[in-house]
Image (cartoon, grey):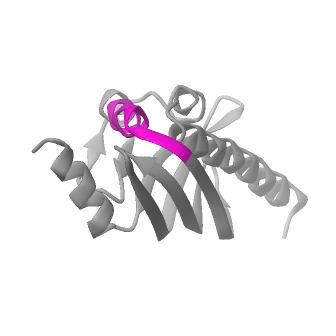
Amino acid sequence: MSTKRVAAEDDVRAASDRFYGALEAMANGDASSMADIWSHEDDVTTMHPIGGREEGWEAVKASWDGVAAASTDGTVTRTNQVVRVVGDAAYELCEESASMTFAGDPVAIENRATNVYRKEGDEWKIVHHHADHDAEFAELVANMGA
């Protein structure tokens, strides 16, 4: 593997560390650091464990803000990470473990995730996050509006 490719993969891993730090902050009620790691373009997308799909930075940001508003006492970890870089794009496969209090109820999530990154200037930014659907978490969110 080339030195340049290894360096790029290390840079994507550092971006991933920032993303998972932002996820943990979100699980504690603060989604503001998501703005630092996400691309702000209209082509970004996310598919959360609660279902649905958001497209465009404003919709993605609103989804993180909504979860943060109801979340406290959270921890998020990432394991079994694989990173691949192809030019100015990269993808990450991993497993996520999260626990938090959401709308007063304890939530524990174990899922697989895929993150897609794009190099914008000198920084790797997330352009897509997809996590397995979690029916119990989705039901909690749905019941908030009941």
Give the residue drawn at x 47%, y 70%. 111
Q: Quadrant of residue 107?
A: bottom left
Outermost residue on the left side: it is 146
Whole-percent x and y of residue 15?
A: 69, 44
As for residue 132 lying within the magenta part, the answer is no
The region drawn magenta spans 61-73
Residue 146, placed above or below residue 32? below
Comparing 49 with 125, the one in front is 49
Q: Tell me the quarter of the image containing the N terminus.
A: bottom right
Q: Tell me the quarter of the image containing the C terminus.
A: top left
As for residue 64 lying within the magenta part, the answer is yes
Q: Quadrant of residue 133?
A: bottom left
Comparing 133 with 104, the one in front is 104
Per the picture, the main secondary structure of the magenta-coloured stretch is helix
Give the residue drawn at x 26%, y 55%. 140
Image check: 94 left or right of 104? right
Residue 47, placed above or below residue 38? below
Give the residue drawn at x 66%, y 50%. 16
